[in-house]
Image: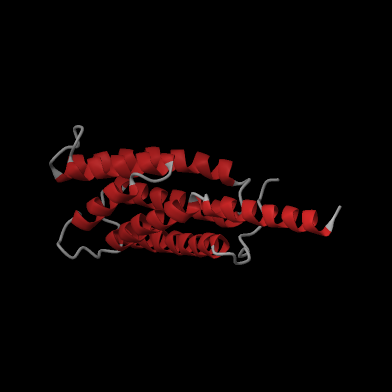
Amino acid sequence: MSVASETDVQAAAAAEAAAAAGNNPVLLGIPCFVVGGLTLGLFLLGYQPDGGAGPVLTNSIFVAGIFGVFAAFWFSFAFLLLGIGGAPANAAAGAQAFTLYSLVWTIVVAVLTLAALRLPVAFSLLIALVAVALLLVFLFYAGGGTATGLSRIAGIVAIVFSLIGVYITYDAFNQALGGRPMPLGNPIVK
């Protein structure tokens, strides 16, 4: 092989790698996921500047357009907050709606966690923590919504999974800009 053709092959490989890094859906999806996760975490911790769910609703609708399963979660969460689709107006019936909602999504995200075990551990951990936060929200509502400690712990878990999302986002942007990959951990299942 001549020197010119080796250089051409190397340049083509570098261009292909750069294009692949630029097509990474994590570049859009995870930052949007982080916005929703941080908003949910702060809401669960009791930070409600207007006294209601307005900021959560706004960010839920924004994040809903990202990443298939999570899009369904955020759209349905926004609908639940809005009372669309038969969500009851009184507090007791609303708590029952949140109980069912969080239980169903805990199950869905737990299954998603099992599927994610073949991804780098950072992704598996992020999704597993989403399932944990949902389980805590379920337990909070199933207990009548009086165990505020569960809500706070769910909020902290949401902040933690959001921070993992920040790390994954940094890695994706770093690679897209020509940097080396950050350690995301080996898959749990190979």
Tell me which residue sits at (57%, 41%) in the image. Answer: 115
State left or right for residue 123 relative to residue 49. Answer: right
Quarter placement of the C terminus: top right
Who is closer to the viewer here, 53 or 69?
69
Q: Is residue 21 left or right of residue 68?
A: right
The foreground one among 28 and 2 is 2
Please tell me which residue lies in front, 15 or 38: 15
Q: Is residue 159 above or below residue 86?
A: below
At 23% across and 40% down in the image, what residue appears? Answer: 79
Measured from the top left, where is residue 28 in percent x and y? 43, 53
Q: Residue 159 at what x, y percent from top left? A: 40, 63
- Residue 95 appears in the rendering: no
Residue most toward the top? 86
The furthest residue to the right = 1
Residue at position x 68%, y 52% in the image: 12
**Colour setting:** secondary structure
Give percent across and percent down for residue 35. Answer: 35, 58
Image location of residue 185, percent across then percent down:
64, 59
Asked if residue 32 shows in the view, the reply is: yes
Residue 79, compared with residue 127, is above or below; it is: above
Counting every numbered tag in the picture gives 0
| Quadrant hosting residue 50 | bottom left
Question: For the point 57% across and 45% down, which residue is it?
Answer: 116
